[in-house]
Amino acid sequence: MMNLEYYQELNSAELKKLIQETRGKLGKKLFILAHYYQIDDIVDLSDAQGDSFALASQGAQNKEAQYIVFCGVRFMAEASATLAREGQRVFMPDTDAGCPLADLADIDQVEEAWQTLQEAGVAQDTIPITYMNSSSELKAFCGKNGGLVCTSSNAGKAFDWALKQKPKIFFFPDEHLGRNTANAKNIQESEIALWDPLKEHGANPNQDLQNAKVILWKGFCHVHTFFNLEQIKLMREKHPGCKIAVHPECPEHVVQAADGNGSTSYLKKFVEEDDSGKTLVIGTEINMVSRLAKHNPDKKVVPLARSLCPNMFKTSLADLAYVLENLPNVNEITVPDYIKNDAKLALERMLTLT
Ligand code: SF4
């Protein structure tokens, strides 16, 4: 068994050769998944590409795959391990690749907030919803408390589902996806409360929690909050008539100033299906925007600004070669059963959204 340092000294041609050899040896037993934000070298060597939930589902649906290697960040590999079928094992090339947004809400903070909502007489009227970009513990919390998981594609449907059952939603950990979703549902600013986990009582008097229809966790993705109105203005000046689409993790004023907003899959379609001949300006992680430009050479695709996710960037060819050559002895991601069962329940409730 070679250690990681051994692979880090090889050049990219040597690493690609090793990776291809291992893929050849393991055949269909191996399934390499790559999130859209991974670097090109990794995407090119993967078997499937997509957003976090689509990939986790594809892993579970692949009956021949025994080893799922998830090139992404930790919450994605955990979701894959949660949904994995009997006998499947999930691995990450770099287990240090986390998600700063997911880390902005931990289970102790969420339990404490829920306790405050209970004391304010609000919890019994509230459905908790966690964004896919969260730890397994938070997904399990939602499963246990009648809530569900949502993605940036189905957040609107998740809000509808929740509000049919109870009058309030507690949404974590991304304030912006929650606010943009609430705006799309015409929920008024006065009906939204912001829960700040670092402040006493979330910085909300009981009255505000009682009045709110939606309580948003004060969390954000630094990759998407990097985008601003000035960049939109500059792009409209530089590319007159351009069309701008952004991810809903961007701040509300950026989403409102864009021509469209949606998940990574939406942004991909936005480019692929456009036949206007106009410049397409995309506000999301730079590796994905560069790939969209590369794969659509007949269109002019430019980034709203360069914004890189350093955690997605962590997974290197050396990491992938290391994990593949040492399967199944290194970097396995597991979720304990007591968390997995409730987390799965919250994910399965999401699958019922129509
Ligand atoms: S882009 Fe944002 S949400 Fe996605 S992994 Fe990076 S920090 Fe997390």
Image: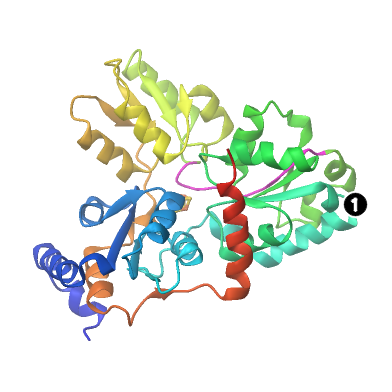
Left or right: 11, with 74 as reference point: left
Element at badge 1? loop
Which SS type dominates the magenta stretch? loop
Q: Does mark 1's beta carbon lie closer than 8 Å to ligand 1?
A: no
Q: Residue at the bottom extreme?
A: 1
Quadrant (top left/top right/bottom left/bottom right) for the C terminus: top right
Would you identify the image quadrant in which residue 46 lies?
bottom left
Residue 323 in the image, given as x and y percentages of width and height: 28, 73
Q: Residue at the top extreme?
A: 241
Residue at point 66%, 28% (across, down):
185
Residue 176 in sight here: no
Residue at point 43%, 63% (across, down):
77
Residue 167 in the image, given as x and y percentages of width and height: 80, 40
Q: Nearer the viewer, residue 276 or 189?
A: 276
Q: Which residues are magenta?
A: 212-224
Label 1: how many Cα within 10 Å (few below 14, some 14–19, many 20+): some
Residue 114 in the image, given as x and y percentages of width and height: 78, 58
Residue labelled with disc 1? 121
Residue 352 within the magenta-colored segment of the rendering: no
Quadrant (top left/top right/bottom left/bottom right) for the N terminus: bottom left
Residue at point 48%, 65% (across, down):
78
Vertical comparison of 23 with 310: above or below: below
Q: Nearer the viewer, residue 199 or 256?
A: 256
Left or right: 57, with 349 as reference point: left
Identify the coloring: rainbow
Would you identify the image quadrant in which residue 333 lies?
bottom left
Residue 53 in the image, given as x and y percentages of width and height: 46, 51
